[in-house]
Image (tube, rainbow, N blue to C red):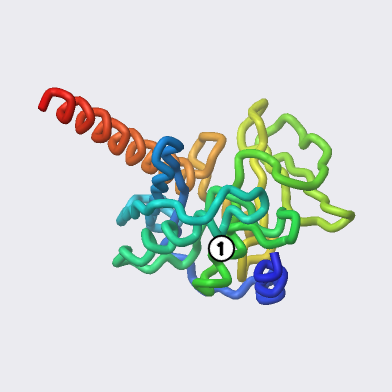
Amino acid sequence: MRVQEKLRARVVEEDQFGEIRFVAGADMAFDPATDMAFAGVIVYRFPELEEVERSMARRQLRFPYVPGLLSFRESPVLMAAFARLETEPDLVLIDGHGRAHPRRFGIACHFGVIFDRPTIGCAKSRLVGEHREPGRKAGAMSPLLLEGERVGVVLRTREDVRPIYVTVGHRVSLDSAVNLVRRCLDGYRIPKPTREADHYVRELRIAYQKERVEKAEAEKEA
């Protein structure tokens, strides 16, 4: 918690980025039976959203599950996946929260500060704060408030579907974060970069679990 409180002072909530040519989506998956973590990153050409490259990493989890401290558990494998990229993204969308966190320092902030990369948190569910329900139409928004401070935006990406939660990670203002997330939509509830990263890590986890089952069966037969 002290580390988070120290690092959060380094978060920049203003626009400090140039031309965005490549945007990356990142997500994580876990195998609860073995505590194996899988990180996936997919880089897209922006604004066309054409895939350029993808990378992954697999690591054994070493940090325990502690609510509010998940970035310490997830960051090592996520950073390993980014280290394997040949294309350097100008912007990163992470399936998780940034400022909308009990100590205003979620994984999108943590990653952004460590890598000093423009980063946006784009989550499927609320972690903290209060908000009114945005309008039913696509594009409707309402502020996400934590102790009276606007820490995010609740964005309806499709008519009559559940909204998503957009929060500042690092070097991107909240208004720009919302605009960039909207430009990454392609007709679905979740922006393409994080949606496809989610599919990618699920496939990695399923393949790993299948491999474990096949190995166990082979050992029994032997």
Residue 130 lies, with reference to residue 11, above or below; the image says above
Residue that appears at 70% across and 32% down: 137
Residue that appears at 73% across and 53% down: 152
Q: Is residue 38 visible?
A: yes
Looking at the image, residue 175 sits to the left or right of residue 72; the answer is right
**Could you tell me which secondary element the residue under label 1 belongs to?**
strand
Please name the residue that numbered disc 1 is placed on. Answer: 119
Residue that appears at 61% across and 70% down: 171
Q: Position of residue 145 (x, y in %)?
A: 82, 50
Inspect the image, locate mark 1, and give the three-letter code of the amino acid beneath it: Thr
Q: Residue furthest left?
A: 222
Q: Is residue 182 visible?
A: no
Q: Position of residue 94 (x, y in %)?
A: 53, 53
Looking at the image, residue 7 sits to the left or right of residue 221; the answer is right
Q: Position of residue 79 (x, y in %)?
A: 43, 63
**Residue closest to the eye, 177 or 210:** 210
**Residue closest to the eye, 56 or 214:** 214
User: In the picture, residue 167 is in which quadrant?
Assistant: bottom right
Q: Position of residue 81 (x, y in %)?
A: 37, 59
**Residue closest to the eye, 71 or 130:** 71
- At label 1, counting other C-alpha atoms closer than 10 Å, the crowd grade (few under 14, some 14-19, many 20 or more) is many
How many labels were placed on the picture? 1
**Residue closest to the eye, 17 or 222:** 222
Residue 16 lies, with reference to residue 43, above or below; the image says below
- In the picture, the quarter occupied by the C terminus is top left
- In the picture, the quarter occupied by the N terminus is bottom right
Residue that appears at 58% across and 59% down: 108
